[in-house]
Structures are given as C-alpha cells and as structure tokens.
Image (cartoon, helix red, strand yellow):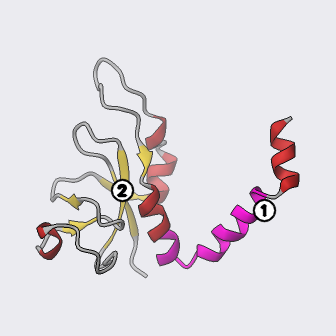
Amino acid sequence: MSMILAVAPSFMASKIHLYAEGYQPGAKRRGDYRRSAYRMSLCGHGRIGDDAVMATVAQAVTELWTARRPGPQDPRPQWSWCRNCLGHALDLAGLTRVALDRLAQATTPENQASKEI
C-alpha cells in the first residue's frame, strides 16, 4: 500500500483531501481532467497541484489542521476532512471492517442512551 497523504485546502477551500500515489477512485467519469496527468484526491473530486501543501495523515492530525479557526490574518473557513476521501482511505488501508465494527459499537442502543445523559 502506498502512503496516504493529507492535502491542505487551497485558497478559500475548506476540505482536507487525501492522496495516495497511483490510486484510482473508480471508473466514474469526473470531467476531462480525470484523464489528464493531474494528481487526484482519493475521492476523485479535485486535482492536486504541484504547489499543494501535503503532509502525512499523522502530521496533519498532530498539527491539528482542523483546529485552525478563521481570523483577520487568515479568513479562510475552518478546515474539515473530506468524508469521501476518508472512506476510500479506510478501504485502501484495509480498515473498513475495523471502522464498521467501531460504528456498530458506537451506535448500539446502550451507547446512544449513555450519550444522551
């Protein structure tokens, strides 16, 4: 498996996309740029430019990319993870079953009742 990298949003965007060298999200047509030499995010939504800021997922989480808030010096909206990229990354990393097990555990009636207290 190739390394999965987090891609910081560009300009006024707010989604942190994920990238893995050579990964193809599927045959779904996503526009003419899909067939070009551009690097694509795991979800296939956006192309990744040569000047994109990328880091390992561990670095992005440790550096709290999603904790950044808009301010006078940097008015961009708060960043969040692309949910589609996360799904592709879980599959690529072989963690789909682990995620499903955790989801099932977190959404049991007992857990839902304890969160409402």
Residue 34 image point, x, y percent:
18, 71
Where is the N terminus found, in terms of image quarters?
Answer: bottom left
Quarter of the view holding residue 38: bottom left
Report, in whole angstroms, how far the alpha carbon at label 1 lies from the one at label 2: 27 Å
- Residue 96 left/right relative to 53: right
Please report the residue visible at 24 percent of the width from the left and 45 percent of the height from the top: 10
Assess whether residue 73 is covered by the magenta stretch: no
Asked if labels 2 and 1 touch by Cβ distance under 8 angstroms, the answer is no
**In the rendered view of the protein, which quadrant contains the C terminus?**
top right
Residue type, numbered disc 2? His
Q: Residue at x 30, y 31 (%)?
A: 76
Query: Element type at marker 2?
Result: strand
Q: Please give the range of residues in magenta.
A: 89-107
Q: Earlier in the sequence, mark 1 or mark 2?
A: 2
User: Residue at label 1?
Assistant: 105
Closer to the camera, 56 or 111?
Answer: 111
Residue type indicated by callout 1: Gln
Give coordinates of residue 102: x percent, y percent: 71, 64
- Is 90 within the magenta? yes
Residue 84 left/right relative to 52: right
Q: Residues within 10 Å of mark 1 (few under 14, many from 20)?
A: few
Magenta: main secondary structure: helix
Q: Position of residue 73 (x, y in %)?
A: 28, 21
Disc number lying in front (1 or 2): 1
**Which label was assigned to residue 17?**
2
